Structure formats: structure tokens, C-alpha cells
């Protein structure tokens, strides 16, 4: 079993996230606990009824900026506890975390191929005091291990069970629920990817047609809005405030992920550099360089200006889902150094090959067929745009092919490692 805790400013937002899934048939409300004056069947309750009690209790202490306690408990593939067992596990977990007297609601989700439940509560008790959250994730992990033994569940470490990782798909504007789709991309990137700057965060978002924009607020820290974009980075439709999305992916959250990402990448970069340096040394062109890296599970994300000139370059470790600038990888991997050694004009490779143990063989059309594109009449900028889109599409396919793969630490484990190193009680 894997337990994943998140915090937020609005209990209603967390309830709404789960209730949306109930409305789409992707979840079921199992129970409410410690709710006063509730005489209806749990399935007949309104969203407002569920959220109001949590909001009322959270209002007992306005000094607590993030009173929402939202946890997901995920079970190993093949484990299908009964509804009674799921509720018993939920109650045991909440009691172990000190929330047995708090109002909380339990949902079962059906939107992945393994059983998991979500529990929403608040960190404020009925006297207005904040529930202790020191070393919250460490306590949760010990409790999780006890519950595995008590209920005969598979041991997470033995089964290599990881927090659920969403297979992200690029947004196709005009189809589906735009706010839901933007939220899925944003929270998926924050949860499953490693980055160390706001620019890198946006580069990852753009692979899936989403953009994050800082908004200046008078007398306050900058806000953050998210919007869908097309292949030319043009905004499509409504922009959504971070605080309005599930899990509230605000600038504070992004800053925490950047801080953790910097430490995680610092631990990994030497190994990645040792793998890529020999490949650079044996490459004589952009084509061979990128194909060599692709075989090793590293993809190039070029940054080309409207004039067609390469001005920057990023590298994506597909297996680890981490993005690096050229300078982070080493001075020989910067755009200037690579142009000097591989050629001034950047070109994507004609064919990409991937390690068969890493991903399925993918050979997307990286070179338009002659009948599709007449290069003698196509402007250079348009060709560069096409090539950039092809690069992004390939990286997207590779990341999706990886799916749930990855033998190493995922974000929850990285956060835990960083917590211990920094001696901080929690990051939420």
C-alpha cells in the first residue's frame, strides 16, 4: 500500500475533485465519519453538505493557511479489498494519524487499474487547535507498514509499488473538460517529473500543450494561472487560477518542487553525465548525437528562435522523468558548445532508436515525405516549427511509453529523502 498526503487551503476544492469523479462514474462515495446531524444515506448527500462541515471546522482557526488533509491509499495490482475492508483500512489509517475524531469523507476511485481510496479531512480540531503534523510523512509510512501486516496486504517495498502515475495525454482544445484536462497535466508534472526552474516546469508542461504564467498581485506574492496552448504556444480558451484547480498547484507548490528537484538532480547528474559524455565524444553530427542519446534513454529538447537559430537546449532523462539544461549536464552540452562541435544549424534526427528494454521501438515520421512538404517553397521558420513539433511529439510518445515504468525513486520517495536531509518536519 502507498499513502500519499497533500495539503490545501480549501476543503471544498478537495471534495469537489472527488465529487467530480463520482459524477463521471469514476469514483464512489463510501462513507462520511464524525459528521453532525447527518441522517441521510451517504449516497444521497449533497456536495455542499459534505464540504460545509469541513469548511466550518477549518474556520475555527484562520491562522492555519492550509487546513485541508487529503490522502490517497493505493493498493498493489491485483489487490481488491472489499468495501468493508476499505473502510476499515481508512478508519485505521485516520486513527493512526490522529484524525479519528475529525470529520472526514472516504471515496473509492475506479480511474486506474489498481484499487485506491481518497480521504478528505481538516487539520483543525473542534476546539480550534491544529492537529500535529510534525514528521507527518514519516509517521504515515510507519503506519502504512503496520496496516499492511494487520490486513494481510502486499508489502509495498517487496512489490515495488509506487504512487499512482498518470499516463498524460496532450490537451486537444475543444474536446473534453478543459479545466479537468489542464489540472491532470499540471498535477501529473508536479507529481511525476523532476525539474529545478520555472522555465523547465513550463518546458515540461508545453509537451502536453499547457502553459503556466505568473501574475503580479499588488502587495502579495505572484499568483499563477494555467492555460492550454497550441503547437505555436498560442493560448487557447480560459486561463485557470492555480487556487481553483484540485490540489491547488500554486507558486508555493512549484517552488517546493523546484527546490527538491535541484537536490535530486544534483545527486543524479554525475551518473547521467558519465553516460552521455562518451556518446557526445563519438558523435560527428546532430543526427548521430541525438540518435546515440535516444538509444541511451535521453532525448534532446531544442529551443529554436523565430529566426531558426538554436539559442538553448534541454535534455530529458526519459526513464527518470527529469529535465536538465545543457549547462546543468556540463559546459560541453550547452547550445553554443554543441553548435561548435556538431554544426551551427540544428537539425532533428531522421530516425530515433530506443533501448528495447526501456520503451517499445518508436519510429515516428520525423522527416516529411516529399509529396507532403516542398522544402524548396517552405519558409525556414515553418520548417523549424515542424521539426520542433516533431521533437516534442517524440518525447511525448517516449514518456507515455514509459508509463508506470521506473525502478528508482518517484517523487514521494524523493521528497521523503529530501525531508530527512533538510531536517524539516514536512513540505506541505
Image (cartoon, grey):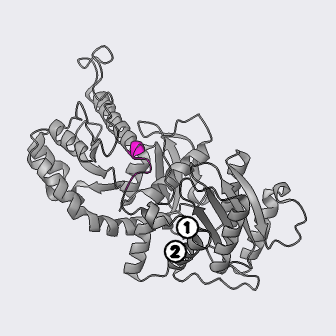
In the image, residue 265 sits, relative to residue 318, either above or below, namely below
Q: Residue 80 in the image: x percent, y percent?
A: 63, 55
Residue at (67% x, 65% y) in the render: 119
Residue at (29% x, 29% y) in the render: 366
Q: Nearer the viewer, residue 69 or 297?
A: 297
Which quadrant holds residue 299?
Answer: top left
Residue at (61% x, 75% y) in the render: 65
In the image, residue 257 sits, relative to residue 174, either above or below, namely below
Q: Which quadrant: the N terminus?
A: bottom right
Badge 1 local density, few (<14 within 10 Å), some, or many (20+)? many
Q: Residue 268 in the image: x percent, y percent?
A: 27, 64
In the image, residue 244 sits, relative to residue 126, either above or below, namely above
Q: Is residue 384 left or right of residue 165?
A: left
Q: Nearer the viewer, residue 255 or 280?
A: 280
Q: Which residue is mark 2?
A: 141
Q: Which residue is mark 1?
A: 3
In the image, residue 205 sits, relative to residue 269, either above or below, namely above
Residue at (57% x, 73% y) in the render: 149
Q: Residue 330 in the image: x percent, y percent?
A: 18, 59
Q: Is residue 401 magenta?
A: yes
Specify which label sits upstream in the sequence, 1 or 2: 1
Provide the residue span drawn in magenta.
399-406
Q: Is residue 255 visible?
A: no
Q: Is residue 279 magenta?
A: no
Amino acid at each position: 500500500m502507498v499513502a500519499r498526503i497533500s495539503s490545501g487551503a480549501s476543503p471544498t476544492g478537495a471534495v469537489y475533485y472527488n465529487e467530480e469523479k463520482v459524477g463521471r462514474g469514476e469514483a464512489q462515495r463510501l462513507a462520511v465519519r464524525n459528521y453532525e446531524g447527518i441522517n441521510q444515506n451517504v449516497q444521497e448527500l449533497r456536495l455542499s453538505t459534505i464540504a460545509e462541515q469541513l469548511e466550518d471546522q477549518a474556520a475555527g482557526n484562520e491562522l492555519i493557511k492550509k487546513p485541508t488533509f487529503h490522502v490517497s491509499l493505493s493498493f498493489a495490482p491485483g489487490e481488491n479489498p472489499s468495501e468493508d475492508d476499505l473502510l476499515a483500512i481508512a478508519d485505521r489509517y485516520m486513527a493512526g494519524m490522529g484524525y479519528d475524531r475529525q470529520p472526514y469523507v472516504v471515496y473509492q476511485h475506479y480511474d486506474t487499474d489498481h484499487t485506491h481510496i481518497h480521504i478528505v479531512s481538516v487539520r483543525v480540531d473542534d476546539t480550534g487547535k491544529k492537529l500535529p503534523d510534525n514528521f507527518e510523512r514519516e509517521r504515515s509510512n510507519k503506519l502504512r507498514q503496520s496496516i499492511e501486516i494487520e490486513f494481510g496486504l502486499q508489502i509495498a517495498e517487496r512489490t515495488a509499488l509506487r504512487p499512482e502515475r498518470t499516463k498524460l495525454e496532450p490537451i486537444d482544445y475543444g474536446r473534453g473538460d478543459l479545466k479537468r484536462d489542464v489540472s491532470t497535466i499540471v498535477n501529473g508534472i508536479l507529481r511525476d517529473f523532476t525539474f529545478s526552474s520555472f522555465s523547465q516546469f513550463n518546458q515540461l508542461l508545453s509537451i502536453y500543450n499547457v502553459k503556466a504564467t505568473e501574475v503580479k498581485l499588488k502587495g502579495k506574492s505572484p499568483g499563477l494561472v494555467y492555460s492550454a496552448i497550441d503547437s505555436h504556444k498560442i493560448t487557447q480558451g480560459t486561463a485557470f487560477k492555480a487556487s481553483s484547480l484540485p490540489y491547488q498547484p500554486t507558486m508555493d507548490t512549484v517552488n517546493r518542487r523546484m527546490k527538491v528537484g535541484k537536490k535530486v538532480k544534483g545527486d543524479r547528474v554525475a551518473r547521467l553525465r558519465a553516460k552521455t559524455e562518451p556518446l557526445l565524444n563519438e558523435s560527428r553530427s546532430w543526427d548521430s548525437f541525438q540518435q546515440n542519446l535516444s538509444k541511451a534513454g535521453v532525448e534532446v529538447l531544442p529551443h529554436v528562435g523565430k529566426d531558426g537559430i538554436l539559442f538553448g537546449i534541454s535534455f530529458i532523462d526519459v526513464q527518470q522523468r527529469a529535465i536538465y539544461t545543457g549547462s546543468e549536464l556540463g559546459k560541453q552540452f550547452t547550445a553554443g558548445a554543441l553548435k561548435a562541435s556538431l554544426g551551427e544549424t540544428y537539425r532533428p534526427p531522421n530516425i530515433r532508436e530506443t533501448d528495447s528494454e526501456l520503451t517499445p521501438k518508436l519510429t515516428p515520421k520525423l522527416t516529411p515525405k516529399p509529396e507532403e512538404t516542398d522544402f524548396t517553397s517552405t519558409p525556414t521558420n515553418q520548417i523549424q516549427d515542424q521539426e520542433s513539433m516533431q521533437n516534442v511529439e517524440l518525447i511525448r510518445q517516449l514518456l507515455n511509453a514509459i508509463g508506470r515504468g521506473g525502478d528508482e525513486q518517484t517523487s514521494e520517495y524523493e521528497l521523503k529523502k529530501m525531508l530527512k536531509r533538510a531536517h524539516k518536519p514536512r513540505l506541505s
